[in-house]
Amino acid sequence: MFWFVVATLPTVTEPHVQSEVGPLHSVLLHRPGTELKRLTPRNSDQLLFDAIPWVDRAQEEHDAFAEVLRSRGVEVLLLRDVLTDALQDTRARAAAVLTGVDELKLGADIADTLRSHLSSVDDAALAEILIAGMTFEELPAAEGQSLVRRMHHPHDFAIEPLPNLLFTRDSSVWVGDRVAIAALAMPARRRESALTDLIYAYHPRFSHSARAYGAHSAPVEGGDVLLLAPGVVAIGVGERTTPAGAESFARSVFADDLAHTVLAVPIEQTRASMHLDTVCTMVDRDAVVMYPAIQDSLRAYTLRPAGDELKVSGPTPFLTAAAEAMEIDHLRVIDTGLDPVTAEREQWEDGNNTLALAPGVVVAYERNAETNARLEEAGIEVLRISGSELGSGRGGPRCMSCPITRAPLPEIT
């Protein structure tokens, strides 16, 4: 099948995303910082990291990732910068202090002292504390005795760090011109939603953007949401996204006329396949890279609006349901590796977690040599980046990026 572009792509400035592969114009990334330096063997499991990253190298790798995007004309917004800008609004600062202080954990006296301290620091310092956290040793001095202080180790966290903020895909996802604030399932990540919500509520760039889904709804994470085509959304249901979350998300996008079909896709509830985008991502308008071990077993429930109700059918094979909803003959499937061992290794190393910059152009970790070779054999341009340290939290280029604006897919003939 051959496609021919029949129109010049318009310049798109307002937030708007209809697909996984439309030409990427702007994206939100988070350059890792002090929050990664908070990881130790004692807390890494709780903070959802499989290894202790070398932070300087992780920053170098992330800078290189951002530069690849900029070299292809993509505007890169850094979360720390947009959070700092948002905090210029006094309402944002009040909300930020509220989300950063857990009075049930700290007790009233320490909580009051900490709120006063956070209210006094400048915007950049407040953003840093909200992201990197604060230990009891770093708390501001206070008069009197405190059992809470004495019973906590100095290096215990009074404010938890957010090392998983690196994976900006999870805490929000754009569907059309609306942003969905994710309801993150794991305790270590729940405060990420509050910061993301704050950015979209108070940063001037997003002041006119409406919401598609609220963080207080049932658990849905952005890594489980794939915009297969305009009007077609797939939602993985597994370790992080619940059936109730998928149904609530579907009702929301149907009510806002953002989609006509939602596919709820059960996935194995394991660390290796925590999100749908760890086993399958779009690499072209009719092609996915997929972990071969699940290709034949992956199923989907098809949800469509029926007045004020939902019509639910299935389950049927995911690839069949997706092609039908996308109104194409079939989805091309590019496997992760040629043999089961290589496929399992490269799936674990985020070989399926690619970021499309345009139809047939993706960013991928260089270490997944077999998968990248297969992508290129299938006509996909692969822009390789290093991820030896970035991948320690189990996330690839797609996980580390939240597209804000993609151009519509060019018409084909």
Image (cartoon, rainbow, N blue to C red):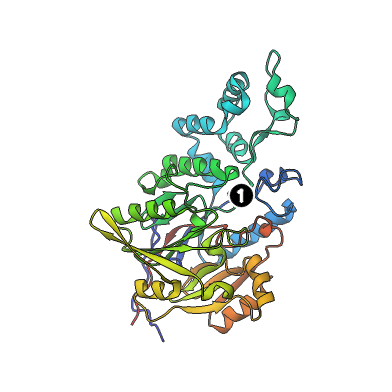
Evaluate whether residue 90 shows in this view. Answer: yes
Quadrant in the rendering for residue 310: bottom left
Quadrant in the rendering for residue 269: bottom right
Evaluate whether residue 291 shows in this view. Answer: no
Q: Residue most toward the bottom?
A: 1
Q: Is residue 47 above or below residue 273?
A: above
- Locate residue 77, reporting x and y percent: 52, 52
Q: For this rendering, which residue is in front, 311 or 366?
A: 311
Quadrant in the rendering for residue 141: top right
Viewed as shown, does residue 372 lie left or right of 224? Answer: right
Q: For numbered disc 1, what is the local secondary structure?
A: helix
Indicate the quadrant containing the N terminus: top left, top right, bottom left or bottom right. bottom left
Q: Which residue is mark 1?
A: 164
Viewed as shown, does residue 310 lie left or right of 386? Answer: left
Query: In the image, what residue type sits under mark 1?
Result: Asn
- Locate residue 387, reporting x and y percent: 68, 63
**Residue at the spot 61% in from the left edge and 28% down from the top edge:** 105
**Residue at the spot 58% in from the left edge and 48% down from the top edge:** 165
**Residue at the spot 62% in from the left edge and 51% down from the top edge:** 31
Q: Is residue 46 above or below residue 125?
A: below
Indicate the quadrant containing the C terminus: top left, top right, bottom left or bottom right. bottom left
Q: Is residue 92 above or below residue 4?
A: above
Q: For this rendering, which residue is in front, 276 or 120?
A: 276
- Locate residue 340, reporting x and y percent: 66, 77
